[in-house]
Image: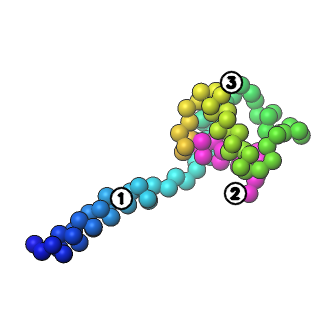
Amino acid sequence: MTNITKTCLFLIMMAFSLSPAFAAKHTPDAAHGKSLHKQKCMGCHDNGQYTRSNRIIHSFEDLRARVKFCDSAANADFSNNDLDDVVEYLNNDFYKFKK
C-alpha cells in the first residue's frame, strides 16, 4: 500500500468518524417538553405565569434565557436538548414568538 493510499484511507476513516457529531442536530420536541414541564416546572408555578398581562418574557431569546434560569434555580438538570424541548413547548402553546 502506498503512502498516498494510506493517507486517503486515513482521511476517509476520519470523515466517517466525525460525521455523527456533525449530523446529530436535535429537532425540538414539544410533546417531550410538555412532559418535562409537568414534571420539573409545575412544582413552582402554574400556567398562569405564561398568560398574565404583565409577563416579563417578550422574545424567544427571553424565553430561552428564562427557562435556562429556572432550570438552574429548580435543579431540574435539563440537558441542552431538554431545554430546547421545554422552550419549544412553551413557545408553541403560550408565547408564539418567531424564532
Q: Is residue 58 left or right of residue 30?
A: right
Q: Viewed as shown, does residue 55 lie left or right of 32?
A: right
**Location of mark 3 (residue):** 43
Nearer to us in this view, 77 or 3: 3
Q: Give above or below for 76 relative to 98.
A: above
Which amino acid lies under the numbered mark 3 shown in the image of this protein? Gly
Are circles 2 and 1 on residues that touch, CB within 8 Å? no
| Identity, as a three-letter code, of the amino acid under mark 1 | Leu
Q: Earlier in the sequence, mark 2 or mark 1?
A: 1
Residue indicated by mark 1: 18
Q: Does the rendering let one see residue 89?
A: no
Residue at 53%, 39% (x, y): give it: 79
Q: What segment is highlighted magenta in the picture?
A: 83-99
- Depth check: give the residue in front, 96 or 72: 72
Tell me which label, 3 or 1, sits earlier in the chain. Answer: 1
**Residue 45 position in % (x across, y down):** 74, 27
Whether residue 4 sits left or right of residue 64 in the image: it is left
Secondary structure under the numbered disc 1 in the rendered image: helix
Q: Residues within 10 Å of mark 1 (few under 14, many from 20)?
A: few
